[in-house]
Image (cartoon, grey):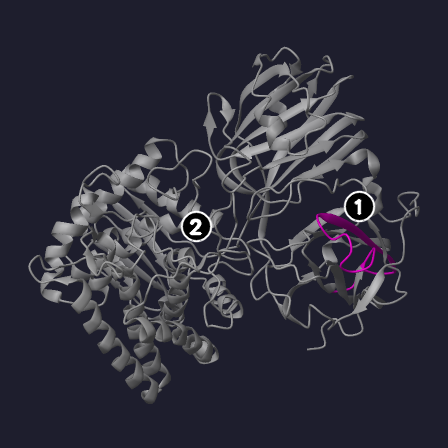
Amino acid sequence: MNIFKNCGWIWYDHYGYEDVNVFMLARKSFSLRDIPKTAEINITADSRYKLYVNGEYVCYGPARGFPESYPFDRIDIKRYLKKGENVIAVVVWQWGHGTFQSIYAGGNGLIVDGKIGKVDIGTKINNGWLVKKCPAHKQDMPRRSVQIGYQEYYDARKISEDWMLPETNIKFDRTDWQEPTWRKSGCAPWFKFEERGIPLLKEEKKFFKKILHMYYGNNWKNWEKERNLTIIYLNELNGKEDRSRVKDPENMLFDNEKFIEILPFPENKKISFIIDYGEEVAGFIGFEIIGNGGEVLDITTTEVCKDGWPFVGDPLSGSKIAMSDRYIARNGKQQFETFSIHGFRYLCLTIRNIKENFKIKKIYVRSISYPFQEKVVFNSSDETINKIWDMCVRTQICCSFDSYVDCPWREQAQWWGDARVQGANTYYLFGDMRLFRRGIKQAGQSQIENGLTYGTFPSIAVGCILPDYTLTWVHTHLDYYKYTGDISLLKEQFDKIEKAISFFDKKVEENYLLPPMPEWWVFLDWAPLYKEGFSCLFNLMYLYTLKTMVEICKILKREDRKNLYEEKSNVLEKRIDKIFWDKKKNVYFDGYDIKKKKIIKKISQHTHTYAILLNLKKEYHKKWIEEILLPPMKEYPLKHPTIIEGSPFFYYYIIEVMKKVGGYEKEIIDFIKRRWGKMIEEGATTCWEVWKPEMGLSSLCHAWSAHPAIHFIELIAGVKPIAKKREKVKIKKPQFVENLYFKIKTKTEEIEIVKNGKNVKTKRK
């Protein structure tokens, strides 16, 4: 691949020096006699970039990836060009350390390649690029959370937006701009490049729904000195409802030319606007204002409100969640957007230092998500079911960026246990499996020497290697093949899969069963499952993986390996039976204390769900469903006295095995209506991470909980894809609703069902 041939990585200083939370500005001027038919450029940066042409925002990138095969974006910028002088401008943000979505490998920079007409705009030596460290961004800021980057503090008085414009429009001040340092492409740590393999994110400017409150109160005494903007926010939950100092506040909620106007007030005071977007959203927060210079705008975002204020937990404990940014205005018209992606519903905009009338034209969100094209349409006579459907679809969209993410709020991380459920959601709802494929490959890239993969990637974060997520990764290869019919991943990744299996094999050989692994994080589920000794669930998961390997080997026609995995699974199954099976009660107990040589007589939904998945002791499947799986489903969450209940995530597997056994369709739908309906009753617009979310700690938008949409498609609409690529579907009579409208698009036809399936229309494409 000749991408970036003769181009180089540019930066404003020596690589590896002063890299933590720094922003670089880069600018390339060029002249065009005519606008070319296409104007395609290739671009990437470490860690992230925003691209502008002639002052207009173009896109955000690159997609997350690994330094050794760094992703780049191919972008046609034709529509932003004009005859005469043009400017490509790029803002690059280097976090300077790893996050839960990136790896810092000691380098930083921007690299661009391409020709606009006859003009070479590549980052080559002496090719006209100018760079500088951004003087407006304050470097010494705290993290937004343990998992992601930094709070933003932007002082607009220190730079003019004109740096993005052609010199024919402005008098460009070259002071402090310099020719960049340069390192040729192919250098460490970015030895190779790869196209992102997925589309650019869908970005759309959207507006808030409502101003809930306007509080006029006192500034905290340390508001100028405290580094952590969220700590300032927590010390300023004061003031009384007061709208007398603001003219026409609702004007900023609309895309028009009208302004709100804030009248001057004493410098020890502030006004806080509490603004509701109306539902969960992920995106960049932006505003357009007319300032006098020195006005301070602080923003804090959250998923929930309490006592009239967006609720924030302790930013110095747990994940240290602190989603706040600051903007200091310069004189005149100006526009600003955060570089960070906020996942939130509620926004507090605190404004201070208003010495003269201050105007806000608009405040908005530039929402971002993966650009899913195909969408299943579903509607029934049951409004609760319709609302749950909408909530699930919205959740999956909010949790789809350049990868699946667990949540758009505190982490934005590609956890692979979550991703397996999200892959199923995506297959049923949208049919676009590119995120799933890309994630499977990236998990393989994260593999360490002993065969385990990281649980989230790209990352080298401490504590993020989960053996059970490595097992899940093996299963997702087979999922992807069944969804798409594409055998290439199985072939490409087979050696890595076997390397992963070898890690668990050695553990079984040394310990009789899979032992506890305190050096890693064995997750399993957010439930009090036994992990201190032999875990029945952990061993059943490995047995499931061995049987998955048998199926993979059949597909690949690897008879020798198939026989080997059949032997291993037979041995492990007998050992599981010997240790965990109770012949009197006909159940599997959850654990075995190795030191005390004593069975742990706990019973969970989890072990029996996997036993059904594995077709173990089929004569007891209905008994387990009725005596172990169903009882907790009929009670208040997590209240059953003797059975360990699964989280919303694990109920994906529980419901799947109930569908497999059959005859429990009504119980499943009633359960979903109770539990997910309760979320809606409590104001949820997206699916919660857990049954009882802890305010400010638990995510209120978690796509591992969005699987009811799948079950509605199968159980209510009666539609189940039965062939790869959704080319064919099986249609049953819909259940439990009197009037149903349902449409699903497949690769070959469009199927429409109305009124209990009596009118089934199919249209060939």
Give x and y (percent) for residue 608.
Answer: 20, 58
In this rendering, does residue 381 appear at all?
no
Residue 575 covered by magenta stretch: no
Name the amino acid type tagged 2.
Gln
Indicate the position of residue 182 as horizontal and vertical percent values: 83, 65
**Does residue 518 sit above or below 332 in this rendering?**
below
Q: Earlier in the sequence, mark 1 or mark 2?
A: 1
Rendered image quadrant of residue 285: top right
- Inter-mark Cα distance, 1 to 2: 36 Å
For image coordinates 57% across by 17% down, the residue present is 238
Residue 751 in percent (x, y) is at 32, 59
User: Which numbered dot is residue 396?
Assistant: 2
Is there a contact, CB below 8 Å, between mark 1 and mark 2?
no
The magenta stretch is: 11-38
The residue at which mark 1 appears reads as 134
State the residue at coordinates (69%, 40%): 141
Image spot of residue 617 (x, y percent): 13, 67
- Of 373 and 179, which appears nearest the observer? 179
Residue at coordinates 81% horizontally, 26% vertically from top-left?
293
Name the residue furthest bottom.
560
Q: Is residue 655 left or right of residue 463?
A: left
Q: Is residue 352 left or right of residue 305?
A: right
Q: Residue furthest left?
A: 584
Circle 1: is it few (<14), some (14-19), or many (20+) Cα within 10 Å?
A: many
Residue under the point 42% across and 54% down: 375
> Dot 2: what SS?
helix
